[in-house]
């Protein structure tokens, strides 16, 4: 399991480097999806599958809006990809910074671990996310509906803004 967590954490760092080093929104959105998927996989491997699923769905909804908005505003017919020289130089710089940080903080990083996320007493298994699910639907149901409505409204606002000047409510009169 340690190898899988390290692999997912490497994917998370690789996605973050892809976001930070690329000026094109298309490839940056791909890096965001990759890093959020890897981060949620790490959460799921530590015993929090509901939290991982909820965060992944929220991240994908937010990234869909951001990607639609930035892709509509980017008028670059030939965006810079990860193989271009300038993007590759930035990516290598960020990898050097990550490795330097790992070497500097590497001996003490395990002190901030999450500890035991589930406990076992006799034959009863108590998971850390079971209580959160019931509280989410009991107390947070109204907030979930409100957040879903705000995300839907944001999507329509972004779509209306990116339609252009010839159609929609933002055209010149």
Image (cartoon, grey):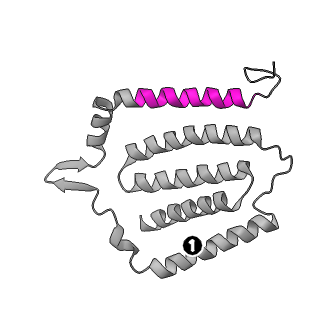
Horizontal side of residue 90 vs 110, given as left or right? right
For this orientation, the residue located farthest to the top is: 173
Dot 1: within a 10 Å radius of its alpha carbon, few (fewer than 14), some, or many (20 or more) residues?
Answer: some
Question: In the rendered image of this protein, does residue 104 appear above or below residue 112?
Answer: below
Horizontal side of residue 94 vs 124, given as left or right? right
Snapshot quadrant of residue 161? top right
163, 125: nearer the viewer? 163
- Residue at image position (50%, 81%) is 103
Q: Does residue 160 show up magenta in the picture?
A: yes
Snapshot quadrant of residue 145? top left
Name the quadrant of the N terminus.
Answer: bottom left
Name the quadrant of the C terminus.
Answer: top right
10, 55: nearer the viewer? 55
Query: Where does label 1 land, which residue?
Result: 98
Which SS does the magenta portion mostly show?
Answer: helix
Image location of residue 148, percent across then percent down:
48, 29
Image location of residue 135, percent across then percent down:
28, 36
- Residue at image position (35%, 52%) is 47
Give the SS element for disc 1: helix
Q: Which residues are magenta?
A: 144-163
Image location of residue 26, percent across then percent down:
72, 48
Question: In the rendered image of this protein, does residue 99 appear above or below residue 170?
Answer: below
Q: Does residue 110 show up magenta in the picture?
A: no
């Amino acid at each position: 399991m340690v190898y899988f967590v390290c692999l997912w954490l490497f994917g998370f760092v690789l996605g973050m480097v892809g976001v930070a080093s690329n000026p094109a929104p298309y490839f940056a959105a791909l890096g965001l999806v990759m890093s959020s998927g890897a981060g949620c996989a790490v959460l799921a491997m530590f015993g929090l599958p509901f939290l991982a699923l909820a965060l992944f769905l929220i991240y994908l909804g937010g990234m869909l809006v951001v990607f639609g908005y930035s892709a509509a505003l980017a008028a670059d017919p030939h965006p810079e990809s990860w193989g271009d020289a300038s993007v590759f130089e930035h990516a290598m710089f960020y990898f050097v910074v990550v490795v330097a940080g790992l070497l500097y903080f590497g001996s003490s990083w395990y002190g901030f671990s999450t500890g035991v996320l589930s406990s076992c007493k006799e034959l009863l298994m108590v998971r850390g996310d079971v209580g959160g699910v019931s509280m989410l639907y009991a107390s947070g149901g109204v907030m979930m509906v409100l957040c879903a409505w705000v995300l839907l409204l944001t999507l329509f606002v972004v779509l209306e803004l990116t339609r252009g000047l010839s159609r929609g409510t933002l055209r010149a009169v």
